[in-house]
Amino acid sequence: MIEADGLTKVFPGEAKGTTVTAVDNLALSVEEGEVFGFLGPNGAGKTTTVRMLCALIGPTAGRAAINGYTVGQNDQAIRASVGILTESPGMYDRLSAERNLLIFARLYGVPDPAGQARKYLQLFGLWERRGDPAGSFSKGMRQKLAIARAMLHEPRVLFLDEPTSGLDPEAARLVRDAIEQLKGEGRTIFLCTHNLDEADRLCDRIAIFKTRLVTVDTPAALRRRLFGRQVVFHLGRVDGALAETVRALPFVQEVKALDTKLVVRLDEPDTQNPAIVRALVAAGADVQFVGELRRSLEDVYLQLIQTAP
Amino acid sequence: MNTTRIRTIVEKEWAEVFKNRLVIVTVAALPLLFAFLPLVVLGTTAGTMSSAGDVTDLPPSFLKACGALPPFECMQVYILNQFLVLYMMMPLIIPTSIAAYSIVGEKTTRSLEPLLATPITTEELLIAKGLAAALPAIAATWGSFLLFALLAPLVGATAGVSAAIFSPTWLTAVFLIGPLMAVLSVNFAVMVSSRVTDPRAAEQIAGVLVVPLMALIFGQIAGLFVINFTLMLSVAVVLAVIDAGAIYLGAQVFQREAILTKWK
């Protein structure tokens, strides 16, 4: 669905004769129906990447293909086949919500502009406000209207650039629900976001990007790769002897004692936990609760971004 | 070239821009003012200029161009010729207002990027924006001229003066130079709009185009030249060449990548 290889974008710098590399040698592949998270700090080149993949700007080097169309060769076909939610909703504030959608439906050559506009206004709960100027909408409503606009021509690939940026929690939830809905319809979604919790919940795979691609994987695999799997054993009391008992087991990789807890790093907790529980009980420990320590995606992100060149 | 997309943008521009009171005032008030101003002058001078002595201050070259016209009619034609420049000025001023609000407005609300993300080509978008700005200006100029020309006999314009209003000089100025001025104005506004973030600033900078037209008024008053058919035709030819250059430069500025990455 989305392919990039060696994709590079270099802009002229502020000072004469200098250049700034916004995207450097990006290679990625996004499958049909996948929600692909694209994470990176401000100025990492995420928007530039989206603009190149949507055939809005040309790459300096490398190639990219969307829906089988090559960037730089079939730009109009690419723009006709993808939907994009730009960083700012950019609505025509003086015009009604419905008029905004009708304009874009006609630009995309939708056969029944009024029908499509109605469909998406109803889908996103904006039908009752269809006659109101877009400028009178709340941020969340504007964002939903912008997503509706990106959907009018029924694209199979959607690029969403910071869809919940600047929204209050309620509005952000409305937008996330809308994305969940689109995911349920099997659309391919390329999601640029700063919201790591959102990426964790919505994305099948995540790319961490800082001018260059740092890594790509599923959220779970990224956690495993960086931190392994860690299990917390809540005990009535913890002493050095109990920690040593666990450490002596051959499959245990690491043990940390924290207050009344032992944090144990394992390869396969599902099969190895029972042996640890048995060993602890035999050593006289009161095992109150066992659970997997789930590292946040934020931990993974910060670790990778801080170590990225 | 997809005409549906062009029509959609033109309609969108009009729906949006004409919700702006300042633009409505510019588009509606200016043509009315420029139609009635010469009528008032014509009406007030019709009863007062009856002696041949009134024309002695006219530039000799203009007196010569009047030919067989009676002296006071020659004087009226001379005065009206100053207003002719207004009809060339109108298609220069109105598109500037519309284009400045349409392009800088989209720039500030950041609505250009979603528009550029559609299959519309930059040529279609530029043509649509140009038409949206130029057509109302041309229509207003022509409407204003027709209003003035048709009402002129009612306020004292003689057959000779009316004939001068419908002479090739006036018709060339209004119906040929007018549209050429509108094209120049639109492209200049596009170029200016790429560099500013306030529609009023764009409007004011683009207003510099009026300066050469003022030279026509003062040139005639000073007796340096006479506004006649030959001069108008020469202006039209020069303007057509300048328009070609302006269209080229406007199209260079109005490119997807430039708009998204260079427009500040």
Image (spheres, coloured by chain):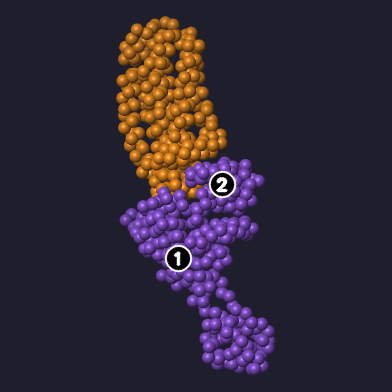
Chain colours: A purple, B orange
Residue B41 against residue A261 in the figure, above or below: above
Determine contact: label 2, label 1, CB under 8 Å: no
Q: What percent of the width, then of the height, locates residue B39?
A: 49, 16
Q: Tell me the tag on residue A116.
A: 2
Residue displayed at 44% across by 60% down: A2
Q: Disc 1 residue type?
A: Phe
The residue closer to the viewer here, B116 or B31, is: B116
Q: Residues within 10 Å of mark 1 (few under 14, many from 20)?
A: many
Whether discs 2 and 1 lie on one chain: the answer is yes
Instruction: Decide if residue A139 is in sight here.
Output: no
Residue displayed at 58% across by 92% down: A244
Q: What percent of the width, then of the height, locates residue A274?
A: 61, 87
Q: Disc 2 residue type?
A: Gln
Instruction: Decide if residue B259 is in sight here.
Output: yes
Q: Secondary structure at mark 1?
A: strand
Dot in front, 2 or 1 = 2
Chain under disc 2: A
Classify residue A50 by image quadrant: bottom left
**Mark 2 vs mark 1: which is more N-terminal?**
2
User: In the displayed image of the protein, which residue is found farthest to the front?
Assistant: A111
Q: CA distance from mark 2 to mark 1?
A: 36 Å
Q: What percent of the width, then of the height, locates residue A202?
A: 56, 64
Q: Secondary structure at mark 2?
A: helix
The residue closer to the viewer here, A236 or B46, is: A236
* Residue on which the image places disc 1: A209
